[in-house]
Amino acid sequence: MNPPRPAPIPDAPPTLKALFLCFTVIGMQSFGGGLSSWMRREVVQRRGWMEDPQFLGGLALAQIAPGPNAVNLCVFIGTTLRGGSGALVALAGLMGLPIALVLVLGGLYGWLHALPGLAPILGGMGAAAVGLNLATGWRLTQRNLRSVSQFAIMVATAVAVGWMDWPLLPVLLVVVPVSLALSFWRG
Amino acid sequence: MFLSLWQLALLFSALSLLAVGGGNGVIPDMQRASVDVHHWMNNSEFLDLFAISRASPGPGSLIVVLIGQKAAGLAGALVAGMAMYTPSCVAVHLASRAWRRFQAATWRKQVEHALMPVAVGLTYASGLALLRSTEHEWVAYGITAGSAVILAVSELHPLAVLAAGAVITLVLGS
C-alpha cells in the first residue's frame, strides 16, 4: 500500500477521487454484464488514463488469474494507476452501490419474483449487453490488430474459448507462446 | 449461525481461487453447495438469487453476497463477499504491481503486443459464450446484432442501447 511512485505511472495519474467516481459510474451503468467493455469505455476511451495495449495486457491478466474477471480487471486498473489505494478505491466504486442494491433486492426477492415484466427486461438488456461486448471487440480489432498473424491468433482464441468451449488455460498455453514467438520474431 | 459463517468463508475462499477464467464457471458449484450440501435454500430460490444478481448493474459475481445474505444475514453477506474477493484480488494486485515495475522495459511492450490479439479474442469469446448459454430467440439475436452494429459505428451511449433492448423485448415478447 505504498503511495504511487510518479515515474512508472502515466503522465498524469488520476486522483483517487476521480478513480472512485469513474468506477462508481461503471458499477452503476453496467446492466446485463459486459463490464470490461464499460471499463474500456470509461478508462481508455473517455478519460485516456491508459492505452489499449496496457488495458489489453490487464484484460489478459484478469482472465488468467483466478477470481471473477471484472473484479480482477478493476484491481489491475486501480493498481496500475494509483497502487494499492487505487485498487481499493476502484473496488469500492465498482462494488459499493451494486452491493447495496442487490442486498435490498435480495430482501425483497419474494416480491420481485412475482413481477411480470422482469424476465423480458432482463433478457433484452442481456442481449444488448452481448452486442456491446461484440462492438468493443470490433473497435479493439480495428484499432490494434495490424497483421494477418495477429488476426489469426485473435480468431483462434475467440473460437476455441467462445465457441468450442475449450477450457481457458490449455488454450492460452498454446496461443500465448505462439503469439509471443511471432511478436519477438517480428521484433 | 457461526457454523454458516465458517462454511461460507471456506466455500467462497476456495471458489475464489478455483474460478479460473471467470466467475461464471463456478456458479454450478455455488448452486450445489448452497442447495444440496448446506441446505441454505432450495433450487428455485437459488435461481431467484441468480436472476437478481443479473438484474443489478455491477459484477455478476455479486451473487455470492446474496448467497451469504440468504445463509446468514448481513454478516453472511460480508463474510461471503470478503472470502470470494480477497484471495483473488490480492493475487491480481501483486501481479499488477510486479508488472508495473517493468513499465519501461522493451520486452514488456513486446509481451503486451503479443497478448493483444489474445485479449481481443477473449473479448469476442465472452460475447460468444453468452450468446450460446442464454436462451436466444430471434428477437434476442436481432437485439444483439443491432446493438453490436450501432455501438461499433456510433458514439451512442450504451445505456440507451440497453434500454432500447429492454423495451423491444418487453413489447415483442421474449
Image: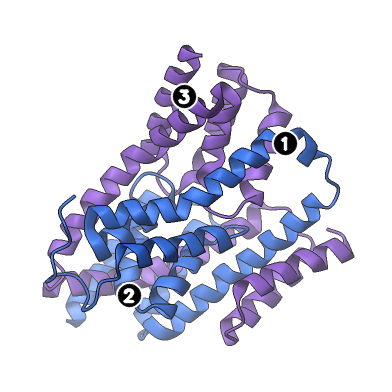
Chain colours: A blue, B purple
- Disc 3 residue type? Leu
Q: CA distance from mark 1 to mark 3?
A: 21 Å
Q: Do the residues at pointers 2 and 3 share their chain?
A: no
Question: On residue A124, which mark appears?
Answer: none
Task: Say which residue label 2 marks.
Answer: A49
**Disc 2 chain ID:** A
Residue at image coords 35%, 69%: A56
Q: Does any portion of residue B41 appear in the rendered image? A: yes
Task: Say which residue label 3 marks.
Answer: B8
Residue at image coords 28%, 66%: A178
Q: CA distance from mark 2 to mark 3?
A: 37 Å
Query: For mark 2, does the 10 Å Cα neighbourhood hold few (<14), some (14 to 19), or many (20 or more) residues?
Result: some
Left or right side of A185 for B77: right
Q: CA distance from mark 1 to mark 2?
A: 39 Å
Residue furthest out toward the right: B172
Which of the two marks, 1 or 3, is nearer to us in this view? 1
The foreground one among B154 and B157 is: B157
Which of the two marks, 2 or 3, is nearer to us in this view? 2
**Which element is circle 3 on?**
helix
Query: For mark 3, does the 10 Å Cα neighbourhood hold few (<14), some (14 to 19), or many (20 or more) residues?
Result: many
Is residue B124 depicted above or below B7 in this figure?
below
Task: Say which residue label 1 marks.
Answer: A109
**Disc 3 chain ID:** B
- Disc 1 residue type? Tyr
Q: Position of residue A11 (x, y in %)?
A: 21, 79
Q: Do the residues at pointers 1 and 2 share their chain?
A: yes
